[in-house]
Amino acid sequence: MLFNTKVASNCPRVLIVLHQEHSSPGRVGQELVKRGFALDIRKPRFGDVLPETMDHHAGAVIFGGPMSANDPDAFVQKEIDWIGVPLRERKPFLGICLGAQMMVKQLGGTVGGHREELVEIGYYPLRPTDAGNSMMTWPKKVYQWHREGFDLPSQAELLASGPTYPNQAIRYGPAAYGIQFHPELTHQMMVRWTTRGAPRMALPGAQQRRDHFAGRFVYDPAVRTWLDRFLDLWIGTAAAPVQFGALKAAE
């Protein structure tokens, strides 16, 4: 699906923050559009400005990228600082991989690599906590692509864990979530990531390319179901704008 960056004035908007020139919000973007939201796509790395308030957005998603939340680049620190806006305003916020790590930094936590330099690139087990189980059913394995993880800030609640990187999903306040894994991944995105990022599959702990596609066949249906339920919980469905024809018919 192609995403139009021109935002319709009569649709509730979700702010989408991406980090590479050709990045896509993938399945998350598709599902938000299906729910009646318009996507306001911005890329601060390339000069886009983030809003000073969430008054004109229903929620925000910061996606992943090849950079680290510890990088000194100005746009990285600006994004970390900006996350304070939806957190203060208690608006729905979702950080995926790098976005989750940025949220942890905003909350005073730390981001870093595994002590044995292990990575997660492929499908890995996910274990929900009691708090996570009380929310919904979680997939047994999820797709990962990272070499850093995050600790658990004192104000955050752990929702799901994993054997290599223990903090996989967290919640802060009523509407802010951070997840280490990638439910947004489409088949086309997997092809692109495993092609351009092929050297990373030689890192310790990474799975081989064929295992990525085999894992998708087995585990993706449950991930898709989880994402659908999660988005219902996180942001719900936008009120559909009334069309002129429908209004006339109701009169």
Image (spheres, rainbow, N blue to C red):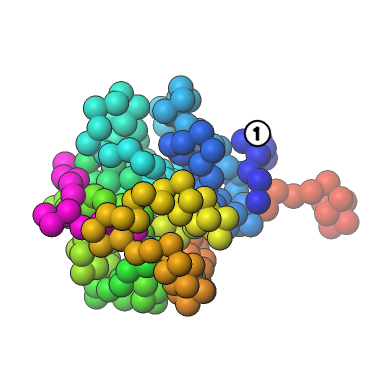
For the C terminus, the image quarter is bottom right
Between 55 and 169, the one nearer to me in the picture: 169
- Kindly state the secondary structure of the residue where label 1 is placed: loop
| Residue at 35 percent of width and 27 percent of height | 75
Residue 15, position as x, y percentages in the image: 49, 40
Q: Is residue 118 magenta?
A: yes
Q: Is residue 185 magenta?
A: no
Most distant residue in the left direction: 115
Between 9 and 60, the one nearer to me in the picture: 60
Between 8 and 23, the one nearer to me in the picture: 23
Residue 123, position as x, y percentages in the image: 37, 67
**Above or below, comparing residue 214 to residue 106 in the picture:** below
Q: Is residue 21 left or right of residue 145?
A: right
Q: Is residue 25 visible?
A: yes
Total marks in image: 1
**Above or below, comparing residue 22 to residue 235 in the picture:** above
Quadrant of the rendered image containing residue 51: top left
| Residue at 24 percent of width and 68 percent of height | 162
**Above or below, comparing residue 154 to residue 7 in the picture:** below
Residue 68, position as x, y percentages in the image: 28, 39
| Residue at 31 percent of width and 31 percent of height | 76
The crowd level at tag 1 (other Cα within 10 Å; few <14, some 14-19, many 20+) is: few
Quadrant of the rendered image containing residue 180: bottom left
Q: Is residue 251 visible?
A: no
Magenta segment = 106-121
Q: Disc 1 marks which residue? A: 6
Q: Is residue 96 left or right of residue 151?
A: right
Q: Main secondary structure of the magenta part?
A: loop
Q: Is residue 232 left or right of residue 126?
A: right
Residue 52, position as x, y percentages in the image: 41, 27
